[in-house]
């Protein structure tokens, strides 16, 4: 399980709920969570703002202080 799905689960959200709240399609969210798609910079920033976590942590597994 990647950091995107970990953070979504921490909030108790389904994929449908998270996609709607972030402003992406369900298909995009599921593909990003399963590493089947690369995110644009704009999309990464949307996820970062929503989860209040750094892009590096969410998409690359690195936690930058």
Image (spheres, rainbow, N blue to C red):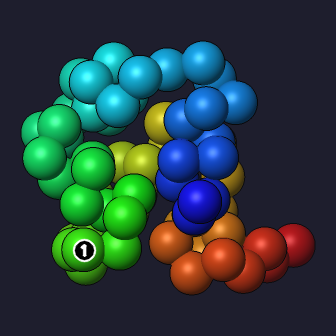
Quadrant assignment for the C terminus: bottom right
Image coordinates of residue 37 in percent, x first then y, are 21, 74
Query: Horizontal and vertical percent for residue 15?
Result: 35, 31
Left or right of 6, for residue 44 = left
Taking the spot 57% from the left edge, 63% from the top edge, the residue there is: 2
* Residue at x-position 35% and y-position 73%: 35
Please indicate, yes or no, whether residue 62 appears anywhere in the rendered image.
yes
Relative depth, front residue between 10 and 44: 10
Instruction: Return the residue found at the far right.
Output: 65
Residue 65 vs residue 24: left or right? Answer: right
Figure check: 48 above or below 37: above
Image coords of residue 56 (percent x, y): 60, 76
Q: Is residue 16 positioned above or below 59 on the image? A: above
Tell me residue 39's x, y (percent). 26, 71
- Answer whether residue 51 is visible to the viewer in this image: no
Q: Quadrant of residue 3?
A: bottom right
Does residue 42 appear left or right of residue 59 in this picture? Answer: left
Considering depth in this image, is 6 or 48 the residue closer to the camera? 6
The residue located at (59%, 60%) in the rendering is 1
- Label 1 sits on a secondary structure element that is loop
Image: 63 above or below 20: below
Snapshot quadrant of residue 41: bottom left
Is the residue marked by circle 1 packed among few (<14), some (14-19), or many (20+) residues within 10 Å? few
* Residue linked to disc 1: 36
Residue appearing at x 63%, y 23% in the figure: 11
């Amino acid at each position: 399980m990647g950091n995107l799905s970990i953070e979504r689960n921490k909030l108790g959200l389904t994929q449908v709920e998270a996609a709607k709240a972030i402003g992406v399609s369900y298909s995009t969210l599921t593909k990003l969570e399963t590493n089947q798609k690369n995110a644009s910079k704009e999309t990464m920033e949307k996820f970062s703002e929503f989860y209040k976590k750094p892009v590096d942590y969410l998409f690359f597994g690195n936690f930058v202080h």
